[in-house]
Image (cartoon, helix red, strand yellow):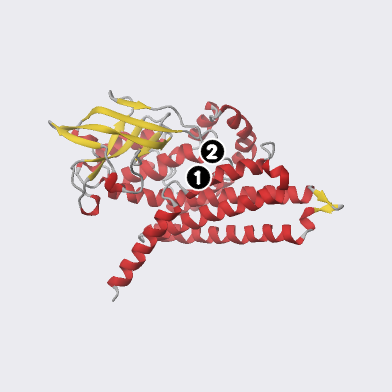
Amino acid sequence: MDQDVFEQFIEQLERYVRERLIPAEREVIETDRIPDEILDEMREMGLFGLTIPEEYGGAGMNIAQYAKTINVLSYAMPAFRSIISINIGMVCSALKNGGTDAQKAEWLPRLAAGEIACFGLTEPGSGSDSAGLQTFAAKSGNGWVLNGTKRYITNSPFAKMALIMARTTKENLPKNAHVSAFLVPTDKPGVSIGSSDKKMGQSGSHIADVILEDVVLPADAMLGTEEGKGFGFAMQSLDNGRISVGAAATAYARRALDSALRYANERKAFGEPIANFQLIQQMLADSEIEIYAAECMMADVTARADAGENVLRKAAAFKVFASEMCGRVVDRVVQVYGGAGYLAEYDAERFFRDARIYRIYEGTTQILQLQIAKHMLREWSAGQ
């Protein structure tokens, strides 16, 4: 997207977040769903196709523009990001990286127009451990038959399509070549969606099991139509997903800090605003320092990604730092609010619950620490 056009878009989005999305948060919390009219507005704004090429009906944003858009959008409650980021950062990314021309032509325009997709990697017995993945795709004539269960699948209750990772062999092959990716319409016979799980936070965002029972698919349902490439496509998508989560966590920390600044200036103790107290100021300053560091990381990793650099390690580092930072910031914000921060009447309590998942999905902090270290050690060994 042209940079001048992008800057105008961001100004429009900032107004939309401030004037439309934030006032709608209470309704989303009470109903646990995003109103249909807001979803329609988000579709009209092109938010479901941010990085999809223009020839497929998208906005054609680069990674830096995408991350900035997610960052601006995520100043509002997380549900508004979740409903679009799986489409863009995960499914569309995998389609762009590995899909055939026919697969792109079929799915990208639909996703850009606002059809919702979900990404099926995690299972009841495996998440980060790809060798433990059990969903199996058996050859059947010219096609495949899928069986298995995917767990914690964001947007699955609304999805028209699921990108499903499945084994195509019982063996555990090097570089996860036992895993392929399949484009599965959710109205296929044998596909069912479990009940939406009750969660600690993130009202309006839904996760559920995707259950596959003898789901018959044609040969061209395999992403890229080449066996053993699915996990690679998924990992490339996860880079974008982790950048999205990092951008979201950074924005939500900023939202929480802005709330604490308002409260600290309004709340009085000993005859003066608590913002005048040095230990309150320390918590505010520490939060500002950490948010600024995350913003710098976001600018760096997205610039590197747009330059064509492999950012697996740096995307993981950004996601870890930003998600852990957000956890620290919202904890301080509750402390600034004091007893009021523990009450559901105030936003601080919600910020605290909402932020906890950032350290878990798209790779837990601990798994990403291992991944970062593994790549560091591999590079060091190669240089000896």
Percent position of residue 278, x then y: 75, 62
248 and 44: which is toward the camera = 248
Q: Which residue is mark 1?
A: 357
Q: Amino acid at mark 2?
A: Met
Q: What is the distance, in whole Å, between disc 1 and disc 2 at their CAs?
A: 9 Å
Percent position of residue 212, x then y: 29, 30
Query: At 36% across and 39% down in the image, what residue appears?
Result: 119
The reply, left or right, for residue 293 in relation to residue 316 is right
Residue 380 lies in quadrant:
bottom left
On screen, residue 37 above or below 369: above
Q: Earlier in the sequence, mark 1 or mark 2?
A: 2
Percent position of residue 359, x then y: 49, 50
Q: Quick one: SS at disc 1?
A: helix
The reply, left or right, for residue 153 in relation to residue 32 is left
Percent position of residue 362, x then y: 42, 47
370 and 64: which is toward the camera = 370
Q: Are marks 1 and 2 in contact (CB under 8 Å)?
A: yes
- Residue reaching furthest to the bottom: 384
Query: At 47% across and 56% down in the image, what residue appears?
Result: 320
Neighbor class of circle 2 (other Cα within 10 Å; few <14, some 14-19, many 20+) is: few
Q: Amino acid at mark 1?
A: Ile
Q: Which residue is mark 2?
A: 200
244 and 358: which is toward the camera = 358
